[in-house]
Every structure is written in structure tokens, then in C-alpha cells.
Amino acid sequence: MTEYTNPVTTAFELQRTAVERSHEAVHTSIDAQQTGIEAMTDGLDTLEDLQFQGTEMAHSGLHAYLDAVEEALPESAEVDFESVREAADEGFESVEEVQDETWEMIDEAVEESLEAYDEAADAYVESVDEGFDVFLDTHEQVEESVTEATDQMTEATEVATDAVDIDVEAE
């Protein structure tokens, strides 16, 4: 014998499943956002490394250029390449200091932003979770009330049908 499944119960189960899937989708979305932010942060680290490498290459390139010019000039040329090299080194040291300070400020700003984002995301997730929990609790209460009312209606219909059958048989 096939067991009877109340269609109202089935409808509520489908609704609950849809709500639970939506809840999971919200969590997946937030996880994806956090992954994206982490990738951006990693990208900044890579950019910082590339900038420092570029500065080092420019510094080395300038020294190589000065070496080549010094070799190409006759010995009688009175150019103080040592002071030019020192001035270039001082200039590159200044550039590196500015880069260090800039990247330090960027790192601090990113760190503060990440902390603020994490706090906001945590609060959002907590709020969403609470909202879904309240909805599902209310949904369950409504399901119980509607199922009970449906069962009572079914019983009343069966009693009425039995009464009609008894009256028909009596005639």
C-alpha cells in the first residue's frame, strides 16, 4: 500500500529547500568576495615586488651606461664619474625610501580595509543567518498550522462523506 503524502507538506518542503539553497548561495557569494579580495592583496604584493625590481634594474642600467660612457671617453676627458655615480645612488636611495614609505602606507590602508571588510562581512553573515533562522522557524510554525488545518479539513470531509454514505444506504 502506498503511503499518503500531504501535498501541503510537500509544498512546504520545497519552499524550505529553496530557502536553504538561497542561504547557501549567500555564503558562497561572501566566500567568493573574500577570495577576490585575497587575490587583489596578493596582486598588490606582486606589483610591489615588480616595482622594486624595476627600480633595481634602472639603477643597474644607469651604472652600466655610466661604465660604458666612461670606457668610451678618452682618458684625457675630465669627467668625475664617481661623483655622478654617487649622485645617481643618492637619487635611487631617495626613490627607494619613497617607495618603501608608499608601500608601507598602502599595506596599512589595505590591512585596515581588510579588517573593516571582514568585520562587515561577519556582521552581514550573522544578520543573514539570523534572518534565515527566523524565517525557517516561522515557516515551520506556519507549516504545522496549515498541515493541522488541512488534516482537520480532511477528517471533516471524511466524516461528512461517511455520513452521506450512511444516509444513502438508509434510504
Image: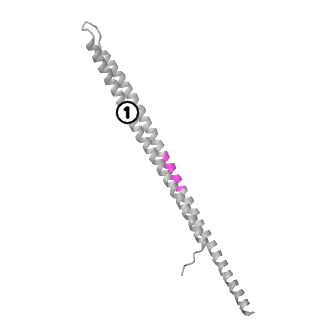
> Based on the displayed image, in which of its 4 quarters is residue 133 positioned?
bottom right
Q: Which residue is situated farthest in the bottom direction here?
A: 170
Residue density around tag 1, few if under 14, some if 14–19, many if 20 or more, within 10 Å: few
Q: Which residues are magenta?
A: 116-127
Task: Name the dominant secondary structure of the magenta segment.
Answer: helix
Q: Amino acid at mark 1?
A: Leu
55, above or below 71, in the image = below
Q: Is residue 117 magenta?
A: yes
SS of the residue under disc 1: helix
Towards the viewer: 4 or 38:
4
| Residue 155 at x, y percent in the picture | 65, 81
33 left or right of 78? right
Q: Is residue 9 magenta?
A: no
Q: Residue at x 46, y 42 (%)?
A: 112
| Screen quadrant of the N terminus | bottom right
Residue 75, relative to residue 13: is it above or below? above
Task: Write down the quadrant of residue 85 in the picture.
Answer: top left
Locate the C terminus by quadrant.
Answer: bottom right
> As displayed, is residue 4 above or below residue 39?
below
Q: Residue at coordinates 57% horizontally, 75% vertically from top-left?
A: 5
Tell me the residue that label 1 is attached to: 50
**Horizontal and vertical percent position of residue 23:** 53, 58
